[in-house]
Image (cartoon, grey):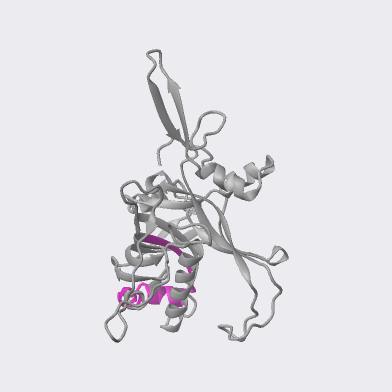
Amino acid sequence: MSVRRLLVLPHLKIHNANALSSPFTIGFPAMTAWLGFVHALQRKLNAAGYPSLDLVATGVISHQCNLQTFQGPGDFVHSIIGTGNPLDKEGNRSAFIEEARCHLDVSLLIEYQADEETQQLMRQPDFIEVISHQLMRMKVAGGDLQAFELPLLQVLDDSDEVAQGKVMRSLMPGFALIERRELMQQAMEQGADALDALLEYLTIHHHCTEDNDGNVIWKSQRKVDGDGDKPGWIVPIATGFQGISELGEAKNQRDPNIPHRFAESIVTLGEFRMAHRIKQLDEVLWRYHTDLNKNLYLCQQAQTESKETANDGFY
């Protein structure tokens, strides 16, 4: 029997998170933002007296995402709602750079590992106070963490699907973010380039039919497979970076001890799936993955055998 240890951060209320997840997509923040936040939390907890604590994987469950855009009457596209805060020293509104923001209500499911001594420390009542104190001092995806419910620790048998399902149902109503890169791979194996493969699943197709009485009926839908199955609530999601220059040094780089390189975002497909539909925790947990031979720095999920490749259209 293997044991899976979880730290649950329920209902993080985040104000003004960065919704510009890549150079050409806005919406739910990139996975690098969530794993970066968890890595920063680990470093703070290591320094706070839990030296062997290792936060190894993270699941993201979205309860609400309020994208700050506006569409006026007759507008074809949405516009970004900008702000100019804070005011300058003379009380005038300062110039602002247009940026996409969103307000979020998100729960994080974090798998952790630690030695026996650190686990004993984590079982003490003051651990929840320590982690709450650290959370109140942190930014999440570039936004301000305004409120959260008390963190929870859970220990599960890895083979107990009933217990895993109970954990996921406790996060309802919510949508777990799942990687669907296999959809991109299948389309590219059939000859599509990466951007076409991405757009193929995101484009809404409008078509009409005419009934026997001459009435025209319009329908709108996204791509379905050959059997008419819908792939689910598919969204673009930024999952990492690819280096486009050699490792080296740059003027004023953040850490002089770490080599620098320029990189571009990697965007693939993801799916928001209702939490109660998750059968195994590995379906929702994201981990860092590095492939230096291809200059890839990724956040990935294990492609489990139980992952659904199609569903009945319900999220």
Q: Is residue 183 above or below residue 302?
A: above
Please state if 69 lies on the left or on the right of 206 as rendered.
left
- Residue at the image point whose x is 41% and y is 63% from the top: 100
- Residue at the image point whose x is 63% and y is 42% from the top: 187
Q: Is residue 92 above or below residue 6?
A: below
Depth check, front residue: 67 or 84 = 84
Q: Residue 133: within the magenta?
A: no
Q: Residue 114: within the magenta?
A: yes
Please tell me in which quadrant of the rendered image residue 143 appears: bottom left
Please state if 247 lies on the left or on the right of 33 as rendered.
right
Q: Where does residue 240 sit, x and y in percent of width and height?
A: 57, 63
Q: Is residue 99 above or below residue 53?
A: above
* Numbered-mark total: 0
Q: Where does residue 19 sit, x and y in percent of width and height?
A: 43, 62
Q: Residue furthest top?
A: 212
User: Bounds of the magenta span?
Assistant: 107-131
Please tell me in which quadrant of the rendered image residue 79 appears: bottom left
Please state if 187 lies on the left or on the right of 107 as rendered.
right
Q: Where does residue 40 sit, x and y in percent of width and height?
A: 46, 75
Residue 179 shows up from this direction:
yes
Q: Where does residue 244 sit, x and y in percent of width and height?
A: 68, 68
- Residue at the image point whose x is 40% and y is 42% from the top: 315
- Residue at the image point whose x is 35% and y is 49% from the top: 169
